[in-house]
Amino acid sequence: MQQTTTALVREYLTDLQDRIVSTVAMVDGGTFVVDRWTKPSSEPLQGSGITQILEDGAVFERAGCGFSHVRGPRLPPSATQHRPELGGAPFEAMGVSLVFHPRNPYVPTVHMNVRMIAATPAGGEPVCWFGGGMDLTPYYGFEEDAVHFHRSAKNALDPFGVDKYPRFKTWCDEYFHLKHRGEQRGIGGVFFDDFSELGFDGSFAMTSSVGDAFLDAYLPIVDRRKSTPYGERERSFQLYRRGRYVEFNLVWDRGTHFGLQSGGRAESILLSMPPLVSWAYNRQTKKGSPEDRLYKEFLVRKDWI
């Protein structure tokens, strides 16, 4: 890639990380630890990043937001399943990824990621594509929250074609599905990958629009739910449902696989893990309960708008 292109994307991503972290720190009242890292020169994967994480906050039990910019000698398998012709090509990747695990069970967990990958096949020109999206994982469902989140995502994508939101919403529903459980991870949102159909400028602008929409999509929900009273029942269910989050990220998530397969920094890649989680054998919900309602009315694929 041309250096000016790389610098443009990097500048946007680091600014996005700073904007999100500074705003969330004000909402929580806590402080993000800033961990700047560089891969050792002895390793095949080269690059650096900035991991920022808040733990044991008033609102967020764990909130991690990481930026990384790495270069490697060959694309890992998780990045070439849709582009087999680039197998073995040297690559460059950069992105911002975040997962926020709230303390209050009535506040949903959220994930957002925006990224760019470029690869250069032998004897060919560099190929560049974008990916990203955001999705919401509630423990107790509220229709107004789901509608707001999806509408925010749609508004971010509509300027780039009215086909984008329905396409990426469907893609998100299909992607964030725990195949081994036959369950949706949450209420979805939008997800896209291997995207370059608008050219570099248009694809970058669309990806940036999704990143820029994140705070307005999520923080009003946090503000509505963060002071809701809860007890041990809600806390127990939250920790149990967090187990599904861990299962998806370790078993199915392409971003996690890409990072680990390419030799990325495990501590930063796994910032998405919640601080506390539980599993229970064959746990059942009481019919008609709020927990049962989550499964029947929210962990299903539906048109929220």
Image (spheres, helix red, strand yellow):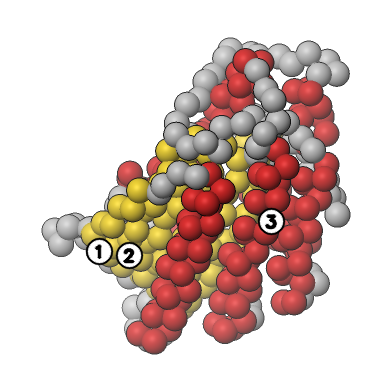
Please tell me whether mark 3 sits on a helix, a strand or a loop: helix
Which amino acid is tagged 3?
Answer: Ala
Locate residue 250 relative to residue 163 in the image: left or right.
left
Q: Residue tagged by mark 3?
A: 217
Q: In this view of the protein, which residue sits in the foreground, 236 or 284?
A: 236
Percent position (x, y) of residue 287?
83, 15
Q: Residue tagged by mark 1?
A: 46
Q: CA distance from mark 1 to mark 2?
A: 6 Å
Q: Residue at x 42, y 68 (%)?
A: 14
Bin the neighbour count of mark 2 within 10 Å (Cα to Cα): few under 14, some 14-19, many 20 and up: many
Percent position (x, y) of residue 301?
79, 43
Q: Residue at x 33, y 45 (%)?
A: 266
Locate residue 212 relative to residue 168 in the image: left or right.
left
Q: Residue tagged by mark 2?
A: 70
Locate residue 139 relative to residue 277 in the image: left or right.
right
Percent position (x, y) of residue 208?
58, 71
Residue 86 appears in which quarter of the rendering? bottom left
Q: Residue at x 54, y 69 (%)?
A: 130
Percent position (x, y) of residue 222?
66, 44
